[in-house]
Image (cartoon, rainbow, N blue to C red):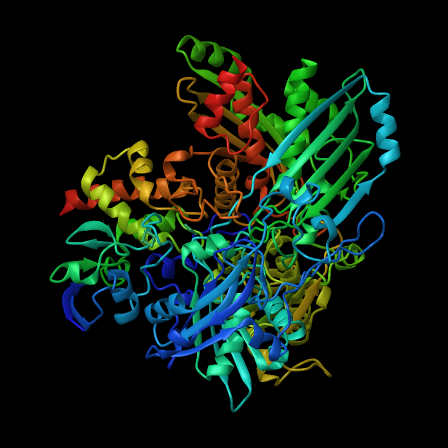
Amino acid sequence: MPAVKLMVNGKPASGDVEDRTLLVQFLRDHLGLTGTHVGCDTSQCGACVVHIDGRAVKSCTVLVGQAAGANVTTIEGIARGDELHPMQAAFRDNHGLQCGFCTPGMIMSAIDIVNRHGGSVDEATVRHELEGNICRCTGYHNIVRSVLDAAGRMKVAQAAE
Amino acid sequence: MGIEGIGASVARKEDKRFITGSGRYTDDIRLHGMTYAQFVRSPYAHAKVKAIDSSEAMKMPGVVAVLTGKELVDDKIGNLICGWMVHSKDGSPMKMGAFPAMAPELVRFVGQAVAVVIADSKNLARDAAEKVDVTYEELPVVADIRAAIASGAPQLHPEAPGNIVYDWSLGDEAATDAALAKAANVVSIELTNNRLVPNAMEPRSAIASYDSAEEHFTLYTTSQNPHVARLVLSAFYNIAPENKLRVIAPDVGGGFGSKIFIYPEEMVALWASKKVNRPVKWTADRTEAFLTDAHGRDHLSKAEMAFDKDNKIIALKVKTHANFGAYMSLFSSSVPTYLYATLLSGQYDIPNIYCEVIGVYTNTTPVDAYRGAGRPEASFLLERLMETAARKLKVNPAELRRKNFITSFPHQTPVIMAYDAGDFHASLEAAMKAIDYAGFAARKDKAKKEGKLRGIGLSCYIEACGIAPSKAVGSLGAGVGLWESAEVRVNPVGTIEILTGSHSHGQGHETTFAQVVADRLGIPISQVSIIHGDTDKVQFGMGTYGSRSAAVGISAIVKALEKVEAKAKKIVSHHLEASENDIVIEDGNFKVAGTDKQMAFANVALAAYTAHNLPPGMEPGLKEGAFYDPTNFTFPAGAYICEVEVDAGTGKTSFVNFVAADDFGRLINPMIVEGQVHGGLAQGIGQAILEGTVYDKSGQLVTASFMDYSMPRADDLPSFKLSHTTTLCPGNPLGVKGCGEAGAIGASAAVINAITDAIGTEKIEMPATPDRVWAAIHANA
Ligand code: FES
Ligand code: FES
């Protein structure tokens, strides 16, 4: 079985895996990072979204071999110690989650949306860009509010840096 | 209320683990030596199983076992049960065929399991399952209600001639017919309530392990009601006695009804874990979820409503065919009967109602309770009928509803339910104000000038929640009582554990239940832990469904808290030498009213456990339990109004506005309540315009993935405007009614009423997709 090496949440990770191993399987089964979820088998739901080199990617749609050498960030890797990422904090403050199953993927997608569109991103853009993330619980109302709130916070944080 | 008490929109305690990726769902758990199960499923909707050859699969290294339905029978593992007996109108019990967990001889829907492969890895189990060679002999198929009841239709179960499970009725047919005969106007309607796939985002999953020394099983599973699962697995499926079976439902990623039922997969995982003497894990992939999670709705109905010359409703007559799929699922029989026909009076004073329901078998996935369960079907039918009637009778739809609203309570309907409280005028008024109903005509005109079709639709729903008084449901055929249990365990330092039979799979119980304790005892919610979902930790309880956790689950907690408080007051009165009746609880202190004497709650707890100085005869400790059996259903109600714009060129519906005014009684955490409404609305709107479950004539589920089944996405939905009106429920201690299903019950009629208003024809089925809307516009032109 081929060996694969990559960085996950800033730490080196490696393993001997079958060629067909998906990135999400590697994260969940080999590294025990079970915050990244699997909600479908057709690349539709977005429960599995992680960042590869800073961009949101559905980890069920990538072989771990394709991520060799890359920097992968998962939901477990975005808080700084006890300090939540502004997107995490905004989801909690705006009740942007119920069962929590879609939440890691939502947060990872949402961070990418704000990174690309900036802090002034509007509701229509957020709704449009969340097309690849399905939530069955919240009706999206509070997810959209969370993302807009976080966008504001991230803008302020960036300005301060 | 205090900043964390009842009525405060406190941020959820459970969120931290979910937003940091440390939630613990069933599939996240790995046990030592674990194997993986992959089911071999029928590709045919109806076929004989002639032979199963597993020799190739068994040769693969790492394959531990291939087990079949015949071995289940040999080991005397029971068939799946339906837990609610419904009798046909001729008095005969419903006619059911056996539902084996893996079919030994005959498969009746695509996806039904015939065998299971157990292997060292998931990938290997999948590969091996493909090598299991099953020989089928195809049989003719009935894929929908019309095919099932056609004369000469293929028969699914010999027990159910004509594929009819029951022909049930409720109400007085003769009186209803007589009222129809003398009516000034009769408005009739025919409609389909489309089949839906629940699609909780977490697929179902089970991990079973067996301890041979203790002869003890543990099951982790995606369940809304782990105690009920244990009861059924023990008493009916013969897996193990209850004391030898622990069922744990850890974090569960949404349920919506679909995780109430005890499915073949967890039963087989348990049985297999003993056979192979290793833990067995099974997790559905999404296609398996589409094929095997119990579906919802699927009715064909005809209804007539009779009005007198003043437009007062004098009768309603309904005939519904309900599709049960290929087998009777756990509570399926109750959904189109006692959860449906009993709500057909809606918010209206209707003196005569008669409803006939014919439940039929088809070669499709079993159908059972899905968010709302029967009540959305009733509400949709009634509110479509009201809107259609208003248009036919040329009266304002709000006016027609107002004229017929029930205004005095209690109100006994002709279909069992006795409404205890409500103010239907208030919620309609609030919704009309929120959407500026008066300004609609001008907006419609303006849209018309821009070439757009604008429509507005009302829906005034009522539902029965707080399920349910045990004696009442027992008399209607339920196999269980529907009370709830709670234990309040005060620790010696005054922190509290609440053990509840309710189960949270997104509802936020860890927060709201703690708020109730904080409110009464004045301690912070951080000092209150909610324990649920584990049969070894928690006393028997009935679980969460039917919007019952607040009305029934919290009521049990309140009852137990009252006992704790009573004992604590005795201790305080003994210590402070005051009368028990003078002790009041304020901000976490037990005070003697009118004095400065007090004892902090933590000190009372400590005194209870040190037991150095208790009143004579008092037992040490501070821990009390309670069972709460509701005296009636609760009746959440409200008014939803939807305003849409339809593009005549494409048939696409856009939402201009959606307002909801709900009466849920007292709100414990308004933020969480609103979240529940948002989610319900999304499911109701999804049913109305997006979600269609399509079987082809051969019984293949054409919409078996998220590519084919249109789940609501962020872009499909509007932001919602919510408001509340309040009448307290007189039946339970906090006056709560329940909010989990309202959105799904009330929304679809509002949307279809708006679309039909916009396009000027009543003829449109759900889901009103752009192609259907376009076709309806053009058929009408
Ligand atoms: S699991 Fe990756 S998109 Fe659904
Ligand atoms: S919070 Fe449950 S699926 Fe989104």
Answer yes or no: is residue B416 visible.
Answer: no
**Can you name the residue that lies furthest to the left here?**
A69
Is B125 drawn above or below residue B412 in the view shown?
Answer: below
Task: Give left or right: position of B724 versus A143.
Answer: right
Query: Splitting the image into 4 quarters, where does residue B648 fall?
Result: top left
**Residue at image coords 34%, 46%:** A133
> As rendered, which of A69 and B719 lies closer to the eye?
A69
The quarter holding residue B320 reads top right
Looking at the image, which residue is at 44% across and 43% down? Answer: B709
Q: Is residue B25 above or below residue B469?
A: below
Image position, residue B480 (x, y; %): 71, 63
Q: Nearer the viewer, residue B530 or B370?
A: B370
Q: Residue at x 75, y 59 (%)?
A: B470
Rendered location of residue B492, percent (x, y): 53, 77
Residue B185 percent across, percent down from the top left = 77, 18
Camera-nearest residue between B660 and A56:
A56
Residue placed furthest toward the bottom: B213
Who's the residue at 58% across and 45% down the image?
B143
> Looking at the image, can residue B680 be seen?
yes
Query: Residue B407 appears at what percent x and percent y?
Result: 75, 31
